[in-house]
C-alpha cells in the first residue's frame, strides 16, 4: 500500500476496484476537512469526479457524494464546518422531533397519534 492514501485510492481505481477506492478516499479526506486542507479537498474532488465518470450505480453515487462533500467543505468559511456541513446534513435524512410515549416512555415522533411500540393512543396535542 502506498504511503499516500489518495494515491492508493488512485491505484485501486486503476485496478478496477472503484468501490474500495472511494472508501479509501473518504477515510483520507475526513482529516483534511478537520484541518481545512484546501489542496487535499481539491484533490479529493478531482479524484471523486474521475471515479464518478467511470462508474455507475452505488459506486457512482458514493463518488458523487464525495465530490459534493469536498466542494461544500471548500465553500464553507473556516470555523463553521460543524455548524453547516456535517455528513448528516448533506446526505442523511433529517431527524424528526421526538417525544416520549406517556405509557411506555419510548421515543416516538412528535406527530404520532399512536405509539408504535405499545399501541398507546395519544390524545394530547403534539409539542
Image (cartoon, grey):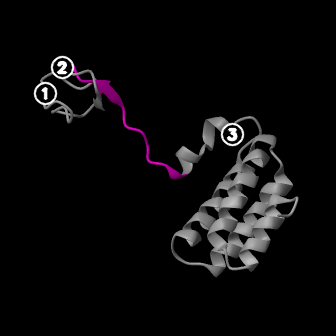
Residue placed under numbered mark 3 in the picture: 81
Q: Which residue is pictured at 73% across the width and 63% down the height?
A: 45
- Of pointers 3 and 2, the one earlier in the residue sequence: 3
The residue lying toward the viewer, choosing from 108 and 16, is 16
Q: Nearer the viewer, residue 59 or 88?
A: 59
Q: Position of residue 41 (x, y in %)?
A: 78, 56
The image quarter in which residue 104 lies: top left
Q: Main secondary structure of the magenta part?
A: loop
How many C-alpha atoms fall within 10 Å of the one at disc 3: few (<14), some, or many (≥20)? some
Q: Position of residue 37 (x, y in %)?
A: 83, 48
- Which residue, given by chain and number where applicable, does mark 2 sit on? 103
Residue 34 horizontal/vertical position (percent): 76, 41
In the rendered image of this protein, does residue 9 appear above or below residue 31? below
What span is in magenta?
91-102
Foreground label between 3 and 2: 2
Q: Residue at x 58, y 64 (%)?
A: 62
Nearest to viewer (mark 1 / mark 3):
1
Disc 2 secondary structure class: loop
Asked if 43 appears above or below 73 in the picture, the reply is below
Question: Which disc, if any, is residue 120?
Answer: 1
Q: Earlier in the sequence, mark 1 or mark 2?
A: 2
Amino acid at each position: 500500500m502506498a504511503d499516500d492514501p489518495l494515491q492508493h485510492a488512485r491505484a485501486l481505481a486503476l485496478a478496477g476496484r472503484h468501490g474500495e477506492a472511494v472508501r479509501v478516499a473518504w477515510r483520507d479526506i475526513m482529516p483534511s476537512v478537520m484541518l481545512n486542507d484546501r489542496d487535499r479537498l481539491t484533490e479529493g474532488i478531482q479524484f471523486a469526479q474521475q471515479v464518478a465518470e467511470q462508474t455507475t450505480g452505488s459506486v457512482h453515487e458514493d463518488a458523487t457524494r464525495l465530490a459534493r462533500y469536498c466542494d461544500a467543505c471548500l465553500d464553507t468559511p473556516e470555523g463553521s464546518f460543524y455548524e453547516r456541513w456535517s455528513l448528516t446534513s448533506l446526505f442523511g435524512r433529517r431527524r424528526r422531533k421526538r417525544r416520549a410515549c406517556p405509557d411506555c416512555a419510548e421515543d416516538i415522533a412528535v406527530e404520532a397519534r399512536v405509539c408504535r411500540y405499545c399501541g398507546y393512543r395519544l390524545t394530547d396535542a403534539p409539542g
